[in-house]
Image (cartoon, rainbow, N blue to C red):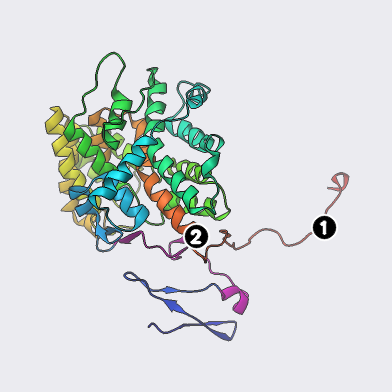
Amino acid sequence: MAEDAKLQVAGKDVQFPVRSGTIGPDVIDIRKLYAQTGTFTYDPGFTSTASCDSALTYIDGDEGVLLHRGYPIGQLAEESSFMEVAYLLLNGELPSGDELTKFTGTITRHTMLHEQLAGFYRGFRRDAHPMAVMCGVVGALSAFYHDSTDITDPHQRMIASHRLIAKMPTIAAMAYKYSVGQPFIYPKNDLSYTGNFLRMTFGVPAEEYEVNPVVEKALDRIFILHADHEQNASTSTVRLAGSSGANPFACIAAGIACLWGPAHGGANEAALNMLREIGTPDRIPEYIARAKNKDDPFRLMGFGHRVYKNYDPRATVMQKTVREVFDSLGVNDPVFETALQLEEIALNDDYFREKKLFPNVDFYSGVILSAIGFPTTMFTALFALARTVGWVAQWNEMISDPEQKIGRPRQLYTGPTQRDYVAVGQR
């Protein structure tokens, strides 16, 4: 067992227990810091603060490791399905065949939306961003499903979790259909989770939609790779909102709002736009030079990560997947060749290696989604669809935690000290 951490503040010696997880760095338990010393810690961005304990996801950024319930993300993406990963994150173990069949059936039976929500969509402008629509619609779910908002009831929490996972593809597909002026397509129960989403997005009533199995598998992988990612900004937002006792639909809507930020969920769109700006492989040296120039505002998007200081383990799967999709769809896009050559150059360039700027999952996912036919405005909506699984798993874990308290960060106050009010005529 680790020794206590010793701290001296204003001449006073205090000790704090050190806690160890199953893997990863130890943490110093400073919950009694203020009571014992009258001081707080200062950690903008919470980069050195563990806000909770969790058994869901483990990341080792230095080694490029990502585990869901102990399983490496590469193995899950190659061997598993998104429904299996959803079950795993919610329940802690991979399902048996019967358990997977039952779980998939439950999700399938919850995919339809309340019919009144179709009218809710029509209240948005036609050119509304899909994320704006998703924020509104997911938040509105609490007005339709009153029987699953009691967070003290484990059964209601389970129903709400299943509903959110099931309805998010329908919500996202309807947001897309509304933006292009096409009729909404209802879910079809004999299709997979991902196949259903593809049909609801790209199908039309005038003809039968055939799901391309290669595209279906690629999108399922993308969903797996985005299912959860530890205590990132949107997940922390869901937990913080949930700590107040807010209903699950409101909490997930808060997560969607946070994910919408370009520094979080918009990275794959930015990476694709960068590749399109470069255009062709012969222009790569020019942009590499610009990226190294501190006076040039250009930055390589899709390289580097807040957590990973090594190769993003999700990017390896994405590189293989993008080849499969392009071959299946017969895509001949210079953007893909540009991406491949840019990656090779950057990985062998001392400048990028020293700064640990390795390709991340966003570098390839935008290229794949674009090849499938999704507009860039839908990229973050797809991210939200996949991450809903992680959000509800994290939310459930938080609600079940006996040590859970309402989130209340402290601050370092730098404003005026106390002063007296002066009447307006005397100012």
Residue 263 at x, y percent in the picture: 41, 45
**Residues rendered magenta in the picture:** 32-61
Q: CA distance from mark 2 to mark 1?
A: 31 Å
Q: Can residue 300 be seen here?
A: no
Per the rendering, the mark at residue 22 is: none
**Residue under the point 45% across and 45% down:** 159
**Within-10-Å neighbours for mark 1: few <14, some 14–19, many 20+:** few
Local SS, label 1:
loop
Task: Give the mark nearest the N terminus, 2 or 1.
Answer: 2
Q: In the rendered view, does 202 fall on the left or right side of 316?
A: right
Between 419 and 101, which is closer to the camera in this rendering?
Answer: 101
Q: Which residue is mark 1?
A: 420
Between 93 and 60, which is closer to the camera in this rendering?
Answer: 93
Residue 403 at x, y percent in the picture: 52, 66
Image vertical order of residue 129 relative to residue 423, above or below: above
Foreground mark, 2 or 1, reads 2
Q: Which residue is mark 2?
A: 44
